[in-house]
Amino acid sequence: MIERTLFDSDHEAFRESVKHFAEREVTPHLLRWDEAGAVDRKIWQQCGELGILCPTVPAEYGGAGVDRLFSMIVLEELAPLGGLGISLSMHSDIVAPYLLAFASSTVKTAYLPKMVTGEMIGALAMSEPSTGSDVKAVKTTAAKVSDGYVINGSKIFISNGFECGLVVVVAKTDPAAGAKGISLFLLDASMPGFKKGKKLKKVGLKSQDTAELFFDNVHVPASHLLGEENKGFGYLMHELPWERMQIAIAAVASAEAALELTIGYTRERQAFGKPVIDFQNTRFKLAELRSELQIAQVFVDRCMELELKKQLDPVTAAMAKYWCTDLQCKVVDECVQLHGGYGFMQEYAIARAWTDARAQRIYGGTNEIMKDIISRTL
Ligand SMILES: Cc1cc2nc3c(=O)[nH]c(=O)nc-3n(C[C@H](O)[C@H](O)[C@H](O)COP(=O)(O)OP(=O)(O)OC[C@H]3O[C@@H](n4cnc5c(N)ncnc54)[C@H](O)[C@@H]3O)c2cc1C
């Protein structure tokens, strides 16, 4: 295996603490959380205490102000354990960066410290019942009034939507202008007219909070406009390489964990008087998966080097998102096969890995949209 060179001793110490936290506070609850359709709310505060939330947020807002490798570590350790990793990365590494980049200092001071502690959970609301891939077709409107905006519309499939305290909402400030009429707003869930719909029942990522949101004449003060009016589409594009990298990172880590699990299982499981791993088919299959994951890891790590230097371009990030999530789905499917019937039983971690993986090819921009982005450069 090729040695990874991204991390220093501080990163490794942090990884150990996240690993121990996961063993103690996450793994024992996974089945219960899946059945309940939610994680315990207190896990967010526990993550906050350990510095797992918003690690890159600067110290003036309560964060550690460290580099994105710390976020990568959180994902690598927690994404293989179900929906919590994705929920945390939405909060820490998608929503918080929007506030940092585009919110006024008053808004930053009001919200970021609460995000760092886990007191408030963040969400990003782009998708709507009638549009997901085509963001510029959103129908939610933000009409200008004397002291701010009035927002009307609805959103669907919003990660952290049910528990969120704040949401970055994509809305049209100039409906006739397409992508040039989109703005971003920070909504507080306590604002009158902001309603949360039911928690959506998913086939995978069962404990991950995904919900509908409704805005019925929500009055938003002008200070909650993020950046400038009608520049929202550009802002959404700004952080996309990093957002897609997060999905690729989660994909490779989750697939690697599934492979490890399967190597262990096939060593233990006997068929025809010998361990399943002793069949040539099993060894060759595991060898193929190990090779492909090693190749994926090297690519992801190189992309991360570029990301740290702010040199990761949208096309390369699209390649990472598409290829790594396709690979993840292939790996976990083969791993289920090598578990036989037990691989289809809910209490087996490999079954959860299989159902959880599927959404990775859909959110963050579908893999078809990734190929469209790549194909435009041919
Ligand atoms: C678990 C989960 C969590 C999510 N979290 C969030 C969240 O936090 N915030 C948020 O805003 N959204 C979230 N989403 C929504 C997600 O981003 C969308 O589902 C996704 O972007 C696809 O949009 P859609 O479902 O409307 O599919 P559609 O856009 O209707 O696409 C349907 C099919 O058509 C294909 N297609 C569409 N356009 C093209 C094209 N130009 N070329 C080729 N094929 C195309 C798609 O690839 C897909 O296969 C989440 C979704 C899931 C499942």
Image (cartoon, helix red, strand yellow):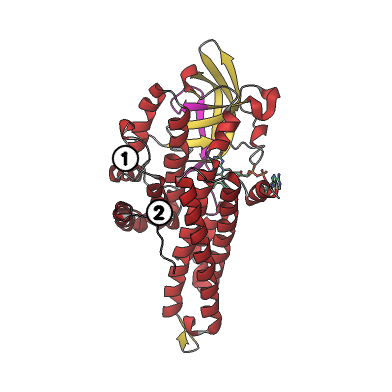
Q: Residues within 10 Å of mark 1 (few under 14, many from 20)?
A: some
Residue sitting at x 43%, y 50%: 85
Residue topped by disc 2: 78
Would residue 345 be counted in the magenta stretch? no
Give the structural element (helix, strand or loop) at label 1: loop
**303 or 273: nearer the viewer:** 303
Q: Position of residue 210 (x, y in %)?
A: 51, 43
Is residue 49 depicted above or below 330 in this figure?
above
For ligand 1, the image quadrant comes to top right
| Quadrant housing the N terminus | bottom left
- Give the total number of marks visible in the rendering: 2
**308 or 193: nearer the viewer:** 308
Furthest residue toward bottom = 273
Question: Label 2 sits on what residue type?
Answer: Leu
Would residue 194 be counted in the magenta stretch? yes
Q: Which residues are magenta?
A: 185-212
Whether residue 207 is visible to the viewer of this picture, yes or no, is no
Whether residue 181 is visible to the viewer of this picture, yes or no, is yes
Describe residue 100's horizontal placement relative to residue 369 as left or right.
left
Question: Label 1 sits on what residue type?
Answer: Ala
Q: Earlier in the sequence, mark 2 or mark 1?
A: 1
Q: Residues within 10 Å of mark 2 (few under 14, many from 20)?
A: many
In whole angstroms, how far apart are the C-alphas of marks 2 and 1? 19 Å
Is residue 25 depicted above or below 123 in this figure?
below
Residue topped by disc 1: 64
Query: Which numbered tag is attached to residue 41?
Result: none
Furthest residue toward top = 146
Is residue 253 depicted above or below 193 in this figure?
below
